[in-house]
């Protein structure tokens, strides 16, 4: 990894998540997320090699992930009750093919958590403090989901994920929480499609 890798990934993520580009046609929806995932893995291969798999067996890790999932679901539920039900374009199209489901449940969470928690939050936190770094990365996280009605819930979820990342000292906890949240969203979308 070079010193420019985080900046490269931030630019690629910003470009790849722009709705006009991502939803240009079906091929861009299929290709962008796995490509971004692959670039993320390649840029952070050294970090992956250093990862201690034993952390995943730690009871504290499980507790943090479970607590993070609970709080994020609570925020989503409160947002839905207070702000109404809205779906992003990606949620509407996410269940149209197995590849889109894989993008939503696996590729997206890995790339997003690397960009927003590891790069943006981590970089800012080293130079400022927790709250400035967490609020900034959470704000950008919410902004790049392109859903104004869910903006505040996304900011709060971003803050929760920053806190979990700080306490667990591993990105794996945030990735796992994000995967579960997106999996729940896909399951709910599939159920809604079958019911209607």
Image (cartoon, helix red, strand yellow):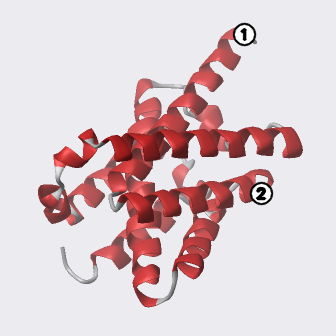
Q: Name the residue beneath numbered marker 2.
A: 148
Q: Name the residue beneath numbered marker 1.
A: 195
User: Residue shown at 64%/69% (left/top)?
Assistant: 139
Whichever of labels 2 and 1 marks the residue nearer the N terminus, that label is: 2
Q: Is residue 78 visible?
A: yes
User: Residue shown at 13%/60% (left/top)?
Assistant: 50
User: Residue shown at 54%/38% (left/top)?
Assistant: 181
* For residue 37, side relative to residue 89 (left or right): left
* For residue 116, side relative to residue 52 (left or right): right
To which quarter of the image does residue 165 belong?
Answer: bottom left
Question: What's the distance in space between the residues labelled 2 and 1, CA to CA?
Answer: 27 Å
Which numbered disc covers residue 102? none
* For residue 170, side relative to residue 137 (left or right): left
Work out which quarter of the rendered image holds the N terminus and state it: bottom left
**Element marked by disc 2:** helix
Work out which quarter of the rendered image holds the C terminus and state it: top right
User: 10 Å neighbourhood of mark 2: few (<14), some, or many (≥20)?
Assistant: few
Instruction: Indicate the position of residue 177 as horizontal and vertical percent values.
Output: 47, 43
């Amino acid at each position: 990894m070079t010193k420019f890798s985080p900046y490269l990934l931030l630019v690629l993520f910003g470009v790849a998540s722009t709705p006009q580009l991502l939803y240009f046609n079906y091929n861009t929806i299929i290709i962008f997320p796995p490509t971004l995932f692959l670039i993320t893995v390649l840029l952070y291969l050294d970090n992956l090699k250093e990862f201690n798999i034993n952390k995943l067996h730690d009871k504290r890790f499980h507790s943090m992930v479970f607590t993070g999932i609970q709080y994020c679901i609570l925020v989503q539920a409160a947002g839905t009750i207070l702000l109404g039900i809205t779906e992003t374009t990606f949620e509407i199209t996410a269940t149209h093919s197995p590849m889109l489901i894989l993008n939503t449940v696996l590729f997206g969470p890995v790339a997003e958590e690397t960009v927003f928690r590891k790069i943006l939050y981590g970089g800012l936190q080293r130079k400022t403090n927790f709250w400035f770094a967490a609020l900034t990365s959470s704000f950008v996280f919410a902004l790049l989901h392109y859903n104004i009605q869910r903006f505040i819930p996304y900011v709060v979820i971003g803050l929760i994920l920053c806190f979990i990342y700080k306490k667990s000292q591993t990105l794996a906890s945030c990735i796992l929480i994000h995967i579960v949240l997106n999996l729940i969203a896909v399951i709910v979308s599939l159920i809604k499609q079958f019911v209607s």
